[in-house]
Amino acid sequence: MTDSPQPVSSAHHVWMGLALDAALRTRASADVPIGAVVVGVDGTVLGTGWNQREELGDPTAHAEVQAIRAAAGRLDSWRLEGCTLVVTLEPCAMCAGASVLARIPRVVFGAWDEKAGASGSVFDILREPRLNHWTEVFAGVRQDECAGLLREFFAAQRAEIDVQRSGDSA
């Protein structure tokens, strides 16, 4: 896994900042801090999403799906042709599939997901030649910031578990 062979633009960096801001909205819940935005052809943010699986009790409430739903609602169309999906973590199989089905031509992501990624690491759904729609992938945008947010979250989760365990044994 390497950063994108595609040239990354300054707009990608700005949009990733918006996705990072969305990821911070998970702090009120136990959700993994992942954020996403769908940006229109003119650079307008059409949809914003953050993980809400824990908050909503919905296994499909991933950041990408939330952002895609919001953008489709705003455009009153399921076809998001010309849009760009920007997400802090490499999309999983469900989210990569959703972006293909929405006809999103570009996906920009920050950190790689070596366990469940479906945009070039474990799987590559976005560029699967047997599908009817293909996607340009821009990987590793602000990767250190995106990965750092996840590392901090999981370190805090592990620390909380350690505290609980030490309290149980007392």
Image (cartoon, rainbow, N blue to C red):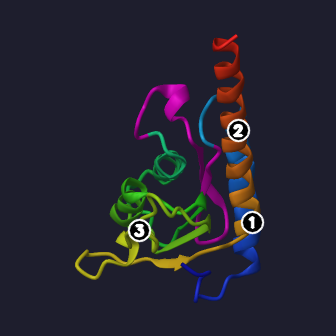
Amino acid type assigned to the residue bearing label 2 in the image = Arg
Residue 153 is drawn in which quadrant?
A: top right
Cα–Cα gap, marks 1 and 3: 20 Å
Q: Nearer the viewer, residue 59 or 82?
A: 59
Evaluate if marks 3 and 2 touch, with contact meaning CB atoms under 8 Å apart: no
- Per the image, label 2 sits on a secondary structure element best described as helix
Mark 1 — residue?
144
Task: Identify which amino acid the numbered label 3 is placed on.
Answer: Val
Q: Write down the residue under mark 3.
A: 122
| Residue type marked 1 | Asp
Placement of 149 over or under 79, stated as above or below:
above
Residue at x 46% of width, y 52% of height: 72
Of callouts 1 and 3, which one flags the residue occurring earlier in the amino acid sequence?
3
For the C terminus, the image quarter is: top right
Residue corresponding to mark 2: 25
Q: Return the disc, 3 or 2, that comes first in the chain's sequence.
A: 2
Q: Is residue 124 above or below residue 79?
A: below
Report the disc number at residue 2: none
Q: Secondary structure at mark 1?
A: helix
Coordinates of residue 13 in the picture (x, y in percent): 75, 71
Relative horizontal placement of residue 68, taking residue 158 as reference (left or right): left
Q: CA distance from mark 2 to mark 1?
A: 19 Å
Badge 3 density bin: few <14, some 14–19, many ≥20, Cα 10 Å: some
Q: Which residues are the magenta region? A: 33-60
Q: Quadrant of residue 140?
A: bottom right
Q: Is residue 28 visible?
A: no
Task: Name the residue furthest front.
Answer: 170
Q: Are marks 2 and 1 in contact (CB under 8 Å)?
A: no
